[in-house]
Image: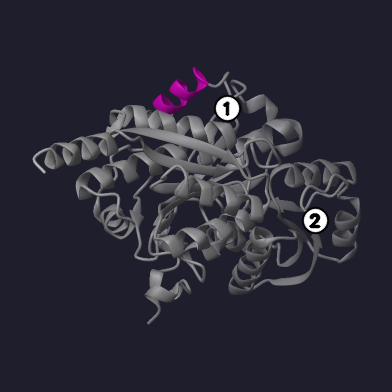
Amino acid sequence: MAGLPGLGAASIAQAQQQPFRIGIVEDLSGTYSGNGGPNTVLAARMAVEDFGGKVLGRPVEVVAVDHQTKPDVGSSLARQLVDQRGASALMLGGSSAVGLAVQNFARERKVTTLVTGNYAASFSGRACSPYGTQWAVSTGELAGAIAETIVKSGGNKWFLIVVDYAFGHDLAADATRAVQAAGGAVIGQVRHPLATADMSAPLLQARASGANVIALANAGPDLVNSVKQAKEYGIKSVTAMLVFVNNVVAMGLETAQGLRFAVNWYWDLNDATRAFSRRMLARNGNVVPDMGHALGYISTLHYLQAVEAAASDDAAIVNQKMRELPFTDGMLSNPRIQSNGRVVTDLYLAEVKAPGASRSPADLYRILETIPGEALFLPAEKSGCPATAT
């Protein structure tokens, strides 16, 4: 019996040396891989390095899996990360349908989720998790940031072109509410499958509707194809609601110039964003980072700080600590976390520059104004999150 305490201590020491794992369930090679993908993984690993590489006495390891935009694949991979790799947290991006399936699994298993690349409002609304935080700007804020300005300038009859899955549905519903609140009307909409190369049919239907605003409730290559083909058809009344740097690069400034949309991060905002971006550019082949990538860094760093402060990876304890701790990276404007897990920040109304106004390949946006977070984000008690309903 005398040897048992020693064996127990050895077992504890061995367990403490097992890596502390953060799993990333992302689109690493498909439709949305440019919005997040490998560069989100790199950003998370940079955050681990900046934190010091260890937490709770264990080396931190980031493990990424490719969900292929399939909810069943994403859920299966998430289960493997938790059950076989011992992941303490899951970062989600690339497809809201996949992310919602994974967050549902994680909620049942009491695992922390960091939603950095999923934009459906339901992540911190009807499908919220007490162990989850939504860092990505959701469809409500994306629509609300532009609707009032457009309606007041005369764009009062909207037609929506909607990608047919959770993100598009949420964005269309939020856009309709925002347009109506501003005094306009949505006179019609058409849905299209994800990854539609030929957008001519929905665009021509939108033009024939009599709308004076054709709003794109899609993203990624679908958005790029929509904007390019709208220009080919001479359709000038197009507005987008979720745009990434890689989308603008794919369109080219000649085509994308003048597009206006909301972002919560841009590489050229301040010294902190520029310093982070220079470091990423040096490691990723000069691919300009975007908000999904930055949120991978910011959320990872904040999560590890909460784990350290809580001296635990218990999801309930850590998520409460995340809501309490101040942000230290300086890359978001006035950030805070609501009780429903919604990360509230100020947003920026961005406009794509004309080719002649751009000073470098990375100089893509002009920031027109800062929109206070309180003007756009729903309070937790009005979000539809069951845990915060009154």
Which quarter shows the N terminus?
A: top left
Secondary structure at badge 2 equals loop
Residue most extreme to the front:
1
User: First in sequence: mark 2 or mark 1?
Assistant: 2
**Would you say 1 lies left or right of 57 here?**
left
Which residue sits at x=40%, y=69%?
Answer: 379
Q: Which residues are magenta?
A: 274-283
Which residue sits at x=51%, y=68%?
Answer: 127
Which residue sits at x=26%, y=54%?
Answer: 321
Disc 1 residue crowd, few under 14, some 14–19, many 20+, Cα 10 Å: some
Q: How is the image coloured?
A: one colour
The residue that label 1 is drawn on is: 363
Q: Is residue 270 visible?
A: no
**Would you say 235 lies left or right of 120 here?**
right
Q: Is residue 79 visible?
A: yes
**In the displayed structure, would residue 228 be above or below residue 168?**
above
User: In the figure, residue 48 lies in which quadrant?
Assistant: top left
User: In the figure, residue 301 lies in which quadrant?
Assistant: top left
Could you say where residue 8 lies in the image, as x and y percent from the top left? 18, 41
Kindly identify which numbered label has been placed on residue 193: 2
Residue type at mark 1 is: Asp
In depth, the one of 294 and 360 nearer the eye is 294
